Image (cartoon, rainbow, N blue to C red):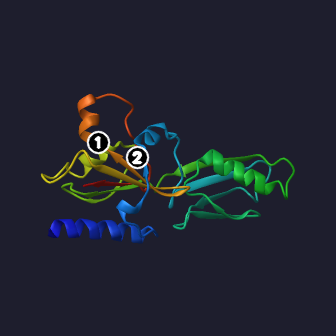
Amino acid sequence: MNRMIGTRALLIIFWALSGVVINAADVPKTSPAALKTAEAEYRLGPEDVIDVFVWKEPDLTTTVTIRPDGRISLPLTDQLEASGKTAAQLQLEITEKLKQFISNPVVNVIVRQVNSLKISVLGEVKKPDIYRIKNRVTVLDAIAMAGGFTEFAKPTKVVILRNGPQGPQRYQINIKQAVSEGAGAPIYLQPMDTVYVE
């Protein structure tokens, strides 16, 4: 009982720190197939460092760190939302903003340093925590990082909580079935995802 209360408290604390207080059961379910078809291109996150290069405009060329609120400040463009976008999407948005001041701006966004790759693994795992990752990881990788399932875990009920552009999303996965069938594309996590094992 104390373990269950502790796990729920940890989940609530995590979402409170990330700016969203949420009950996992209240988040609408989305098909796990949507996870597999999600684009694999890296999406920017807080603390990532990016270079913004504007051709023939040295005063507009800069290196910037994405703030905890997910925004960046650039000359002439004011504040822009960077978190959750790919480098190409942000590049296009900066280009559009600069068109008000420069004719035919040529912008290039390069990811210099990746610092936002963190995931949380909570619930019935042996070492629930927030983990910093260096590469793409699957749901199975994340559970392994957290020491594997406890004896009370339900591998048929693993939930991924993700803050998407349309708000929080909830995906339920049957790990037991995925492992036994051994088929299909692996399910990769995105930075700031939470894996919750019931």
* Direction from residue 47 to residue 99 in the image, left or right: right
Q: What residue is shown with label 1?
A: 174
Residue 127: give x, y in percent of width and height: 21, 57
SS at badge 1: loop
Image quadrant holding the N terminus, namely bottom left
The quarter holding residue 83 reads: bottom right
Between disc 1 and disc 2, whose residue precedes? 1
Location of residue 53 in the rendering, given as x and y in whole percent from the top left corner: 70, 50
Residue under the point 17% across and 66% down: 3
Badge 2 crowding class, 10 Å Cα cut-off, few under 14, some 14 to 19, many 20 or more, is many
Question: Mark 2 falls on what kind of element?
Answer: loop
Query: Residue 116, image x and y in percent?
Result: 46, 56
Which marked residue is nearer to the observer: mark 1 or mark 2? 1
Task: Assess disc 1: are there few (<14), some (14-19) or many (≥20) residues with their C-alpha within 10 Å of its C-alpha.
Answer: some
Residue plotted at (33% across, 28% down):
183
Tell me what residue is drawn at x 35 percent, y 60 percent: 25
- With 152 as the anchor, is 49 left or right in this view? right
Residue 177 versus residue 43: which sits nearer the camera? 177
Q: Is residue 62 above or below residue 35?
A: below
> In the image, what residue occupies the spot 56% across and 63% down?
70
Q: Position of residue 177 (x, y in %)?
A: 26, 36
Tell me the distance, in whole angstroms, between the alpha carbons under discs 1 and 2.
Answer: 15 Å
| Residue 189 - label | 2
41 is higher (above) or lower (below) than 26: above
Q: Are marks 1 and 2 in contact (CB under 8 Å)?
A: no
Residue type at tag 2: Leu
How many numbered badges does the structure rendering display? 2
